[in-house]
Amino acid sequence: MPEPENMTEKKQNNHATFYVTNKGFLVPTLVSAWQVHQRHAALTDLFIFLVECDPALRERLEASFPQFRFIEVPGQEYIPAPEVYFVKNHVPVSTLARLVTEPLLPETYERVLYLDGDTQITGDMTPLLTCEVPEGKIAAGSGGYWLVRHPLSNPGVSNYFQYLKQDDPREYFNTGVMAATRQTWGEVSRAALSFFMKSAHPDMLNHDQSALNAVCVGKRLHLPPAYNFHRKYAELYLGKSYVPKIVHFTGMHKPWLYAKLPWSPNYVQPYLQLISAFPFLQETLAAAPAPQPAGGRYLLSCLKQVLGGQVDLKDLKKKREVFWDYVKTQDFLVE
């Protein structure tokens, strides 16, 4: 990993890319932010919002990573009251903190890109960083419901979409990558936080993602899957036929913990490199990232999952057809 450089020599942009993280997600967040910086430092300034971060740790972060601005999220505005429905083992409460970030950004930033910390930058993000998202709109990639043929035939999914007042699974978006004007992000995030605090209950399957979808009906512009290549896409095993630009490690299997389908073991290397360069970050993780397994052992474990029925080849073929139809026919904001 390269040596830190002096950020003061860099001209400020009017575009901000920001993350929100607690201590446990700090390592993957720093990896993703570093990858953005390496590729696109001239196009965007990087902010990492810290939730409940020890002051001593923040000082070490600021000294070690002058490329980024670290901002503590103050107060308890985003913390749900005890009577508000929230499943803490699904996502941490800190995910709600992104809904209070807009006032904390310096006033000079007019356009924003939010990225989840469990992402890696694997391609050119220039089209996303330079696009002009219209005022009142938010650009985001689709979730995974639409990959299933007739998803609304499932009562649970149908009830969820009725709750969100959506009738098209293609319009449901994953909130791990979102681009907007700064003003629109402020309006949308405040509305989503208010909606969540007043409306959260078991039908709200994905907490703040549900709230953002509920308040953005009719406001969402499509980003291609390449800009939020989450687990549902990775499980299509498209290989080199579709190359992602932002990989999003949704689901339980995180590559900084262990290598398992659908993620390649190669994704663990940036985490190992970061901890090697900055050993104090090891103490922020519950466990050290496992070294990438030998290629033969990893391929054998993948084969066992296929033969064990964890990969349905017929279903895989159908979902690939749906994916390619979407990619070829959808009008995307960027290419």
Image (tube, rainbow, N blue to C red):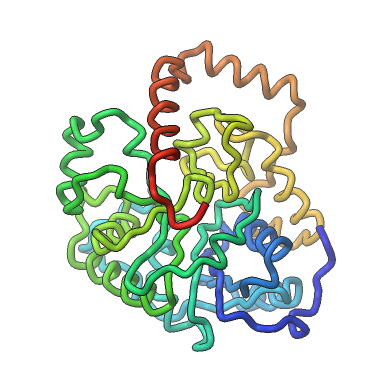
User: What is the residue that sits farthest to the right in this orientation?
Assistant: 3
Residue at position x 64%, y 45% in the image: 256
Could you tell me which residue is drawn at 31 percent across and 49 percent down?
172
The correct choice, above or below, for 85 with respect to 107 in the image is above
Give the quarter of the image for residue 178. bottom left
Residue at image point 33% right, 59% down = 220
Lateral position of residue 148 relative to residue 38, left or right: left
Residue 47 higher or lower than 211, as above or below: below
Q: Where is residue 204 in the image (x, y as percent from the top left)?
A: 24, 51
Q: Is residue 314 left or right of residue 62?
A: left
Outermost residue, top direction?
Answer: 307
Residue nearest the observer in this picture, 130 or 26: 130
**Nearer to us in this view, 59 or 47:** 47
The percent position of residue 247, horizontal first and vertical second, equals 57, 46
Taking the image as shown, residue 214 lies to the left or right of residue 109, namely left
Q: Is residue 210 found left or right of 252 in the rendered image?
A: left
Number of marks: 0
Identify the image quadrant of the N terminus. bottom right
Percent position of residue 191, x then y:
26, 71
Looking at the image, residue 215 lies above or below residue 318: below
Q: Residue at x 53, y 46 (%)?
A: 226
Q: Quadrant of residue 6?
A: bottom right
